[in-house]
Image: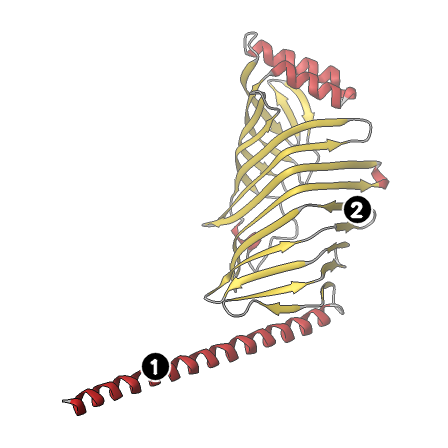
Amino acid sequence: MASSSRTDASGVTRKMIRLAVAVIVVLVLYTGGWFYAASWVKTTLDRELAASEQGLHSASCSNLDVRGFPFRIGLFCDSVAFDDRATGLSATFGALRSAAQVYRPGHAVLELDGPAQVRITPDLVFDADWDLLHASATAWIDGLNRASVAYDGLKGRLNVPSEGVSVGIAATHGEKHVRQSGDALDVAASFDALSLDLGDSVLPPLDVAVDMTIADAARWISAEGPPADAPRGASAELRRLSLDLGDGKVMALSGPLKVGDDGYLSGTLDLDIAGISVWRDRISEAFPEIAETAARVAQAIEGLSKGNDRAVVKLKVEDGTVYLGLFPIAFIPPF
């Protein structure tokens, strides 16, 4: 009986040893595979980034490193820069930290530090900084499927000296989302407490949100990329563009739009506005040069609403000119 017990115990011990050895082998192979993959990624990126310096489209990632063992793999850079010599676009950013799960490499998250500067020839410069910016993306070899960006404490300034433009921008929080939806592209964005400093006037903070679908534009975020003349020729359904001053004073637009081959916008929009007099006063204070026009438009809308401070009216956009009834009230420059 004792002999049988010793035999059984010996058999269990051998199984445990085999299991332990198998686990160790798997761990060793996994560890070797992870570090081999990390080394391959770093070497490949270093080579591609160095080669890009000789072309029209270059990118750099200072002190590139690959980290995340054991369950993640991600890129880390002290700073990031892009330069598109063909279009005259260049940009610099602070540190980049990214990560993807080993078992789900097509889904990545990242954080990007400021400050940032975007420059477009000849003299457009946008400087920005933020408290926190994080993003996520789902992609495969054919490009992005969806992507999101969220940030807090954004502050920036756009300067175009040749046009006499200098605009300061600030927002407590903002988000942007894009995703493929069949052949279409869904786009949504929001800004909390967005304020604009126009130099001689400052627009009071307001919340802005936009939600739209662009037809036949899914390929814009694929490996194919958008056409050179995008968004010209594109059609979109504007589900909602809202401007919110608080206390129920909201202006919202919705309807179909199309950008012509010449870049001018056309379409039919529903305008739902609450607080007509408040919007008139805010626009007049921020843009004194159009105060008279703002007053006339507000009066026309109030007439259509039979004196109420809220109205729903139709706007028609033809080749960039916005009409309320038969009267032009605004002009949208070409894209």
What sort of colour scheme is used for the picture? Answer: secondary structure
Q: Which residue is drawn at 55% across and 45% down?
A: 177
Dot 1 lies on which element?
A: helix
- Name the kind of residue labelled 2 in the image: Val
> Outermost residue toward the left?
1
Given residues 303 and 284, the one toward you in this image is: 284
The residue beneath circle 1 is 19
Q: Residue at x 68, y 63 (%)?
A: 77
Q: In the figure, residue 25 lies in which quadrant?
A: bottom left
Dot 2 lies on which element?
A: strand
* 329 horizontally vs 311: left or right: right
x and y, in percent, of residue 16 in the image: 32, 82
Q: Which residue is drawn at 59% across and 56% down?
A: 110
Q: Upstream in the sequence, badge 1 or badge 2? A: 1
Quarter of the image for the N terminus: give it: bottom left
Q: Nearer the viewer, mark 1 or mark 2?
A: 1
- Name the kind of residue labelled 1 in the image: Leu
Given residues 189 and 248, the one toward you in this image is: 248
Quarter of the image for the C terminus: give it: top right
* 198 horizontally vs 250: left or right: right
Task: Answer few, some or many: residues within 10 Å of disc 2's Cα (few below 14, many 20 plus, some between 14 and 19).
Answer: many
* 97 horizontally vs 155: left or right: left
Q: In the figure, residue 249 lies in which quadrant?
A: top right
x and y, in percent, of residue 93 in the image: 72, 55
Q: In the rendered view, would you say 282 is above or below 156?
A: above
> Outermost residue toward the bottom?
3
x and y, in percent, of residue 113 in the image: 68, 53
Q: In the rendered view, would you say 328 is above or below 33?
A: above
Given residues 186 and 147, the one toward you in this image is: 147
Q: In the rendered view, would you say 140 is above or below 280?
A: below
Task: Answer few, some or many: residues within 10 Å of disc 1's Cα (few below 14, many 20 plus, some between 14 and 19).
Answer: few
The residue beneath circle 2 is 125
